[in-house]
Image: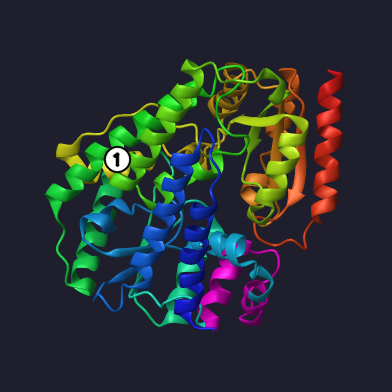
């Protein structure tokens, strides 16, 4: 199968889902979600014929710079996730990744990515961009993609601490990357456009925080696993009009639900905190299971709960650097894991009146799994039980769906008894 068919399949899946969407409280925001996905991958699909310059980049990379330079981004991990979700071909991708020497212990989205490039299922990027956010898998993945795709690359060295000296260091790293991209692509940085993106980033984060405030209500007006769609905004469209349109629509829908008192307490029996990402290929199954037991994820401190921040559009590059330190994943998963972070997780559970927590123990993410006991002990001390579920984001062979379902059902029954 050719590259175009793979990307076309993602686009076609999004279009079909949009057409099949049923009337409901989130219909318009869901339509925008799938429209945005279709827009993203259509742009990537047509990049070559439109003379576009493709930059593949790993997770938490400052794609704002790519948009400001009119460069076509390819989010590597998210693309692997969506190929698993929509195409169901993760077994072949992971097998192809194993053929190039990637062991089963390595993060499966990166193994699948290597497999996709090896099979020719994704367009080879013109450049590869990666950083040490958020783990060793990410830090090494860029080198492998450069080798597989025979393209140049740039490694962004992100400092560990957040202080003036290290922010200045990161700004200089970003300046070097801009020069690299200008040289390789022939595109000049549009600094006015980057300032506009930073201004929209402020709006994006304000909308996200407004949505999170609405999710504090009991019962929550948000869908049981709606947080998975919240990831789209910053992963694929940071500071872009698509992110603003989606978040505004979702915010307005939640407000309408609250205003019209269209909340059904009987549908929310268990308010949950979600730690890490559940298996993407199990999304539909988990939706049904959560609905059956009245389980709703109301807060995800590792991914969707942003701290309040406002950036200065007149200092656009510094603002991009500063933003990397307030990404939820950066201070929970990148470190340092100190008492403030533990307090942040426990306070989140209390603020959202959480009854239980589910930690999706993605075995390929060793640094995240290292926090399981720390968070479990802290939450238990606060009277909040936590379930750790061994799993993989895209590889279903790690833990069968039936076993995961049984563990969740027993956990929900335990919560019933509390």
Q: Which residue lies at the image location 42% right of the left edge and 39% below the top edge? A: 161
Q: Find residue 335 and report its horizontal and vertical position in percent.
A: 52, 40
Which region of the structure is painted magenta?
A: 93-119
Q: Is residue 116 magenta?
A: yes
- In the drawing, does residue 234 fall left or right of residue 64? right
Q: Image quarter for residue 375?
A: top right
Query: Can you see residue 408?
Result: yes
Q: Which residue lies at the image location 68% right of the left edge and 46% below the top edge? A: 369
Q: Is residue 279 above or below residue 407?
A: below
- In the drawing, does residue 400 fall left or right of residue 207? right
Say few, some or many: other residues with alpha carbon within 10 Å of mark 1 (under 14 / 14 to 19 / 20 or more).
few
Q: Is residue 111 magenta?
A: yes
Q: Which residue lies at the image location 22% right of the left edge and 37% below the top edge? A: 199
Q: Which residue lies at the image location 47% right of the left edge and 21% below the top edge? A: 213
Q: Find residue 223 and report its horizontal and vertical position in percent.
A: 58, 34
Query: What quarter of the picture does the N terminus occupy?
Result: bottom right
Residue nearer the viewer, 340 or 27: 27
Q: Which residue is disc 1 drawn over?
A: 165
């Amino acid at each position: 199968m050719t590259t175009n068919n793979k990307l076309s399949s993602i686009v076609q899946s999004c279009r079909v889902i949009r057409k099949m969407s049923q009337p409901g409280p989130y219909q318009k925001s869901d339509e925008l979600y799938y429209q945005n996905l279709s827009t993203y991958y259509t742009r990537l699909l047509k990049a070559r014929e439109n003379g576009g310059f493709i930059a593949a980049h790993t997770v938490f990379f400052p794609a704002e710079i790519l948009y400001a330079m009119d460069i076509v981004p390819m989010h590597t991990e998210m693309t692997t996730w969506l190929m698993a979700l929509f195409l169901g071909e993760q077994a072949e991708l992971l097998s192809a990744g194993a053929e190039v020497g990637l062991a089963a212990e390595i993060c499966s989205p990166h193994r699948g990515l290597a497999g996709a490039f090896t099979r020719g299922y994704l367009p080879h990027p013109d450049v590869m961009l990666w950083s040490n956010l958020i783990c060793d898998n990410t830090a090494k993945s860029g080198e492998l993609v450069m080798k597989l795709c025979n393209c140049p690359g740039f490694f962004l060295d992100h400092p560990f601490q957040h202080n003036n000296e290290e922010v200045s260091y990161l700004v200089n790293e970003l300046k070097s990357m801009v020069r690299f991209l200008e040289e390789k692509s022939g595109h000049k940085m549009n600094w006015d456009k980057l300032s506009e993106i930073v201004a929209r980033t402020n709006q994006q984060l304000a909308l996200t925080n407004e949505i999170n405030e609405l999710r504090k209500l009991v019962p929550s007006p948000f869908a049981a696993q709606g947080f998975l769609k919240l990831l789209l905004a910053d992963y694929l469209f940071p500071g872009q009009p698509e992110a603003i349109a989606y978040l505004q629509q979702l915010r307005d829908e939640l407000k309408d639900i609250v205003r019209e008192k269209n909340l059904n307490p009987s549908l929310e029996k268990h308010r949950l905190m979600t730690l890490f990402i559940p298996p993407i290929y199990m999304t539909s199954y988990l939706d049904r299971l959560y609905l059956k037991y009245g389980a709703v994820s109301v807060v995800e401190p590792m991914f969707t709960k942003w701290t309040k921040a406002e950036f200065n559009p007149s200092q656009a590059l510094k603002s991009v650097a500063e933003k990397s330190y307030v990404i939820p994943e950066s201070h929970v998963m990148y470190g340092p894991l100190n008492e403030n972070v533990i307090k942040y997780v426990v306070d989140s559970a209390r603020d959202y009146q959480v009854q239980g927590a589910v930690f999706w123990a993605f075995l390929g993410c060793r640094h995240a799994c290292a926090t399981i006991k720390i968070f479990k002990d802290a939450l238990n001390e606060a009277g909040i039980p936590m379930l750790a579920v061994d799993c993989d984001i895209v590889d279903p062979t790690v833990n069968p769906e039936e076993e995961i379902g049984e563990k969740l059902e027993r956990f929900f029954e335990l919560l019933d008894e509390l």
